[in-house]
Image (cartoon, rainbow, N blue to C red):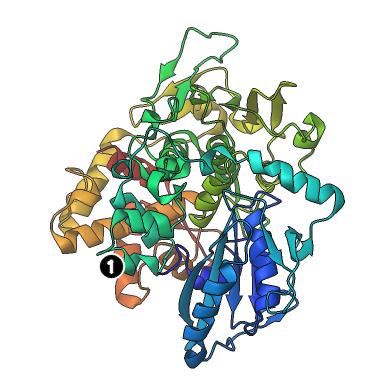
């Protein structure tokens, strides 16, 4: 059965950190099984590791095209592995998948962190005399665990991260196969082709989402976090609460506007919270500079900083605490509170430094893997550095972090850019959270409801869509649905960044040609939803498109329907 990850992304190193991947040009069972043992012991709490047989490496990077494994040897290798697995103490069995790449066959061995660690394996499993030893990963190498490392490894037997534990009350039927299919489709896993006729039990087992012996198997907590429509049923408080304090939480705490709690699978909660912040809270100011080609764009809050902060709040929180993640939007900052603070090995100074953090123990290691595969998190320990970097790039003050000695909570405050700081926030007719004095202070021309409605009607008339009547996903006419989805993708992409025409279509996953350019770009520019950079020539190689205020209002209106 296939693995729940795309082999190309795996080799590219964009989805899984390099220290969790070992490339082997050929079948070398002694070396390979030492590494399987190290991944199973999971000394660094990485969750799992991959060994790809049939791929040579050059300075840690895969050599393409790959060497491959001769087809006639694959069956023999798989039979040998059955015998070698019995040499583990206690028994351990990695998952194996034969994948196609560059026209060749490669063997992918997925070694999940074992639930009965520590594991031993003979150093030379093909030798006549076998001496079992413990092995662990150290950076990108497999080494024997000795001395203090061996003692710490043995102590890990009683420390299984919460998300990797079996749940005592859940049943397999609590896990949605539809959500699993959507995930596998998003990460482009070949496993998607195998699950149509497979039993839910077999799918969960292949994805490493079951715990315990066959007679008393339990669904792992991470399966419920990611693939249950109601994880709050098992982990009360699994939600994000967004509250707007028009005059600030300290100055006027009784004056607030509550947004409906955001619930659902963890990745959906994160995405919905980010969608709200991106469409309703984040605002942009464009300043044309006569002496330079490119306009200066500043944001009240850079999206990438909020993306990391919100994702980390759900990734690193404790799901044994019954408190939701709280996002407070105030005139001068956005404050995010999560309960179950950072690892005690990290000092407050280290958290505030902005440097990459090295954490040995993760509370929710498997959850982090799933979020990483979806592109919601970067590498481990990079979240806070990304926040600091994006704020600096935007010209914003640095983030402020607060926690207590017992690490019961974690607060990160993302400051508003000084140009957007206001005495009071208001919610306009389109649902935007804006400063009461921004029109006077910034000279910003806000888009009215009537203008947005007229633009949506013009789109519907031009393309025979029903954007104002229903969500794009529910439009039944296939051609209209495709067109509506394309329009939303184009506008959505420009919410985050400016792009050249070709880059925009690539970002929106729309085929780029002269017909599609005329169909979409020309009309949307004519409507005033998107526009060119008028400081540059139309034919300039640096020319880009950006989303106008009207375009932003139209996108908000569409998403509200």
Q: Is residue 198 left or right of residue 435?
A: left
Residue 429, position as x, y percentages in the image = 33, 27
Residue 487, by quadrant, is bottom left
Quick one: quadrant of the N terminus? bottom left
Quick one: quadrant of the C terminus? top left
Residue 258, by quadrant, is top left
List the single residue furthest toward the front: 129
The reply to whether residue 358 is visible in this rendering is no
Residue 142, by quadrant, is bottom right
Q: Is residue 347 left or right of residue 120?
A: right
The one of 383 and 24 positioned closer to us in this rendering: 24
- Vertical side of 431 occupied by 174: above or below: below
Residue 255, position as x, y percentages in the image = 47, 10
The one of 168 and 312 positioned closer to us in this rendering: 168
Say which residue appears at 59% left-offset and 43% top-offset. Answer: 308
- Vertical side of 314 occupied by 367: above or below: below
Q: Is residue 168 left or right of residue 527?
A: right
The one of 448 and 195 positioned closer to us in this rendering: 195
Q: Which residue matches tag 1?
A: 519
Say which residue appears at 31% left-offset and 71% top-offset. Answer: 516
Say which residue appears at 41% left-offset and 56% top-offset. Answer: 205
The reply to whether residue 508 is visible in this rendering is yes
- Vertical side of 83 occupied by 238: above or below: above
Residue 438, position as x, y percentages in the image = 52, 28
Q: Callout 1: few (<14), some (14-19), or many (20+) C-alpha neighbours within 10 Å? A: some
The one of 504 and 470 positioned closer to us in this rendering: 470
What SS does tag 1 mark? Answer: helix
């Amino acid at each position: 059965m296939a693995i729940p990850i795309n082999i190309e992304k795996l080799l590219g190193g964009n989805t899984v950190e390099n220290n969790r991947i070992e490339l082997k040009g050929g079948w070398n069972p002694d070396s390979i099984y030492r590494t399987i043992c190290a991944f199973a012991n999971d000394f660094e709490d990485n969750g799992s590791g991959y060994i790809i047989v049939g791929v040579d490496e050059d300075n840690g990077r895969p050599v393409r095209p790959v060497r491959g494994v001769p087809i006639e040897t694959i069956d023999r290798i798989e039979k040998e592995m059955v015998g070698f697995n019995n040499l583990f103490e206690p028994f351990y069995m990695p998952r194996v998948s034969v994948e196609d790449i560059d026209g060749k066959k490669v063997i992918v061995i997925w070694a999940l962190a074992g639930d009965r660690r520590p594991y031993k394996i003979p150093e030379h499993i093909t030798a006549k005399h076998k001496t079992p030893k413990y092995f662990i990963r150290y950076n990108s190498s497999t080494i024997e665990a000795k001395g203090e490392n061996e003692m710490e490894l043995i102590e890990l037997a009683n420390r299984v991260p919460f998300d990797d534990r079996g749940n005592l009350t859940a049943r397999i039927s609590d896990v949605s196969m539809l959500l699993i299919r959507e995930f596998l489709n998003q990460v482009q896993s070949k496993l998607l082709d195998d699950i149509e006729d497979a039993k839910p039990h077999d799918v969960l087992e292949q994805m490493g989402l079951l715990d315990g012996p066959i007679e008393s198997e339990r669904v792992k907590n991470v399966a419920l976090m990611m693939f249950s429509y109601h994880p709050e049923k098992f982990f009360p408080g699994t939600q994000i609460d967004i509250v707007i304090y028009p005059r600030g939480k300290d100055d006027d705490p009784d004056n607030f506007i509550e947004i409906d709690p955001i619930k659902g699978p963890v990745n959906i909660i994160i995405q919905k919270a980010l969608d709200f912040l991106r469409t309703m809270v984040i605002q942009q100011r464009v300043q044309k500079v006569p002496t330079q080609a490119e306009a200066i764009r500043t944001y009240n809050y850079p999206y990438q900083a909020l993306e990391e902060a919100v994702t980390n709040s759900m990734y690193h929180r404790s799901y044994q605490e019954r408190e939701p993640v709280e996002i407070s939007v105030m005139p001068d900052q956005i404050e995010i509170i999560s309960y179950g603070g950072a690892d005690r090995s990290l000092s407050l100074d280290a958290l505030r430094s902005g440097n990459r953090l090295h954490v040995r123990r993760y509370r929710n290691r498997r959850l982090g893997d799933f979020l990483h595969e979806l592109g919601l998190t970067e590498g481990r320990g990079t979240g806070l550095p990304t926040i600091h970097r994006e704020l600096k790039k935007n010209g914003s003050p640095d983030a402020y972090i607060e926690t207590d000695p017992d690490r019961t909570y974690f607060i990160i405050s993302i400051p508003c850019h000084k140009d957007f700081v206001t005495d009071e926030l208001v919610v306009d007719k389109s649902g935007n959270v804006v400063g009461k004095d921004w029109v006077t202070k910034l000279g910003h021309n806000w888009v009215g409801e009537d203008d947005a409605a007229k633009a949506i009607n013009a789109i519907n008339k031009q393309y025979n869509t029903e954007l104002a009547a229903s969500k794009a996903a529910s439009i039944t006419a296939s051609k209209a649905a495709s067109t509506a989805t394309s329009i939303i993708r184009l506008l959505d992409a420009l919410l985050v960044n400016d792009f050249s025409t070709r880059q925009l279509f690539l970002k929106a996953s729309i085929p780029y040609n002269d017909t599609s350019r005329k169909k979409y770009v020309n009309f949307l520019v004519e409507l005033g939803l998107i526009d060119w950079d008028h400081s540059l020539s139309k034919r300039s190689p640096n020319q880009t498109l950006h989303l106008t205020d009207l375009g932003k209002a139209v996108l908000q209106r569409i998403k509200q329907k």
